[in-house]
Amino acid sequence: MASDWSNCAVCDHRHVTKPSVVWCSECDEGLCGDCNEHHSISRSSRNHATVSIAEFKKLPKEILQIATVCKTHNEKYELFCRKHDCPCCKKCVKSHNDCKGLTDINELIKNVKTSNAFYEIEQTLLEVAENIKLIKTNREGNWTSLEKQKKIIEEEIKQTRTNINHHLDELQDKLLNELKAAEQKENSNIQKLLSDLKTKEREITEFKVNIDNIKQHASELQTFLAIKHFETVISVAEKFIHSIIKSDATNRANISCQFTKSLAQITSSVQKFGEINVSCEPCNLSIKKRKQKQAQIMVAIPTKNIDNLTLTLLKRINTELSNVLGCSLLPDGRMVFACLKQDKTIVFKADGSKDIEIDNIGPTFDVAFIGDDCIAVTSANIKKINIIDTKNKKLKKTIEVTSAIDGIAYKDGHLIYCARDKGLQMISLSNESVTTIINKKLSDFAFVATFGDKLFYTDSDNHSVTCCDYHGNILWTFCDTNVLEFPLGISADNDGNVFVVGYFTQNVVVISPDGQRYRQLSSSKDGLKRPQVLHYDTSTNKLLVANEHETAFLYNVK
């Protein structure tokens, strides 16, 4: 956190209170006018950049609170640890002994304000702001469209109700007309029968009057003949009555109404007029994207572009070995070579002279440094990993595995190894638990390297180099037999550039971190003859390359 910038720090040490007028970030203190004048001409501080307090106060609060000195030791930051992504003072170095790539922080902060990393941050902030506007516009547009959709649905609901009412009105009128017609038909039948009965009733009444007159005034003969006539008339009348009784004419007519079931269900089964559904569809909003960046931006840390990489030969080593398939650089400058044909591992001193020879552990294939002066050596078909103590010059431990092992790499307490038919696997050195990263057959003589959260492995059968993550997801594959044929040993530098040897093309090729570009760094013209392995030391930026037989080369990489 920045010191108290309101008062002059120098005057404060003299128990004098004077307001500061400028701020020196390198001294991490404010200065009054007089002290600033001395500060600007003093040999130790004349090159320090200062800023007026008025301008300094404009910095965001979170920037002012950033500590510019070590919180633990209260000393200036002088180094930056890439592994832990943090600045360090001189005293912090003790806790970073095993960290590779400690960098002078003064080199990192040169021209930081004009660096590509700072430019990327500026552009990314602009991009984020534009994307926020795009998303706001998109959401506001959705808001407006929802209001319009609501109004449209309201009209549809009302129109549906109107249509239903109109349809029900038509059905009602039709049913009422049917009721009226049924009632009129039955009434007509009844009226017709009543009319016939009324006619017969008049006829019978007349006959009754005639019978009384005949009974009083007609002769016996007339009366007899009249009886015969009346019998005929009465017979017809009785037949008329019987015919009515036997027919349906006297059935009682009733009118009822049976409503359609679906119509009756409107009040019982139909509990909703409809249902409002809210659906979501994928947003087709195309936000702006800058180039793909690493998950974490390492501000102002210089990176190696493969176009600018150069190899400077430091040493030519005569290994006197045949079929070298493993090599590694140790932190103290020693070089390790594993020889499959002669079943031995040899450690050379930094000057190229032989230091240790271990030939009692059986076949040896690849080798990797694992810390504490120890190396791990694979043994191809023997299905075991030998841990060798190079300080005490003895076998420390043997780890039994279930597959043949070719190439090997070390990462944070784990060994990643090429397990042939079982793919790419990882074993913990603490409890020997095994995790499968890629469950597919690898070629024989496959090698593996690590960088951050990425793995790189070679496939000599298909002449390719593949990059994947620790979940086995393939990120890219490089394959060009005009450049790289039968790739074997592989390694990576601090920037993710991938170094690989081509056995048939007799060269060393570097591939960019995205797998899109390549460059040949060394070839047979430089002494490479059937090279098989290499190792890049990230702490010293040195590259060790070993031919199949007898010769190895140590390069400085810039």
Image (cartoon, helix red, strand yellow):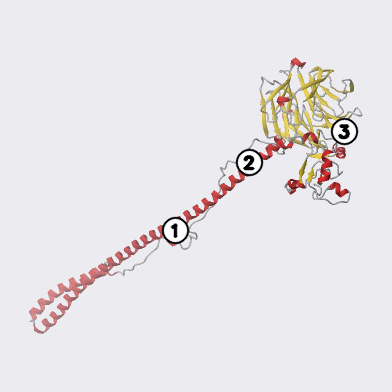
Residue 372's mark?
Answer: 3
Q: Secondary structure at mark 1?
A: helix
Which quarter of the figure has residue 552? top right
- Of callouts 1 and 2, which one flags the residue occurring earlier in the amino acid sequence? 2
Residue type, numbered disc 2: Glu
Between 99 and 371, which is closer to the camera in this rendering?
99
Percent coordinates x, y for residue 267 in the rendering: 46, 63
Residue to which mark 2 is pinned:
127
Q: Could one spot residue 516 in this view of the protein?
A: yes
Percent from the top left, x then y, of residue 373?
88, 31
Left or right, 440 with respect to 248, comes to right
Dot in front, 1 or 2? 2
Inspect this view and state whether residue 418 appears.
no
Task: Name the residue nearer the viewer: 508 or 328.
Answer: 508
Q: Nearer the viewer, residue 420 or 111?
A: 111
Residue 158, label in figure:
1
**Disc 2 to disc 3, how far (Cα)?**
47 Å
- Which of pointers 1 and 3 lies earlier in the amino acid sequence? 1
Q: In the rendered view, tell whether residue 250 sits above or below residue 430.
A: below
Q: Residue at x 79, y 30 (%)?
A: 538
At label 3, counting other C-alpha atoms closer than 10 Å, the crowd grade (few under 14, some 14-19, many 20 or more) is few
Q: Position of residue 12 (x, y in %)?
A: 86, 49
Q: Mark 1 to mark 3: distance in Å?
A: 82 Å
Instruction: Give the amino acid at mark 1.
Output: Lys
**What SS does tag 2 mark?**
helix
Q: Secondary structure beneath disc 3?
A: loop
Looking at the image, residue 136 sits to the left or right of residue 271; the answer is right
User: At label 3, which amino acid type do we have?
Assistant: Asp
Q: Which mark is residue 81?
A: none
Q: Residue 396 is drawn in which quadrant?
A: top right
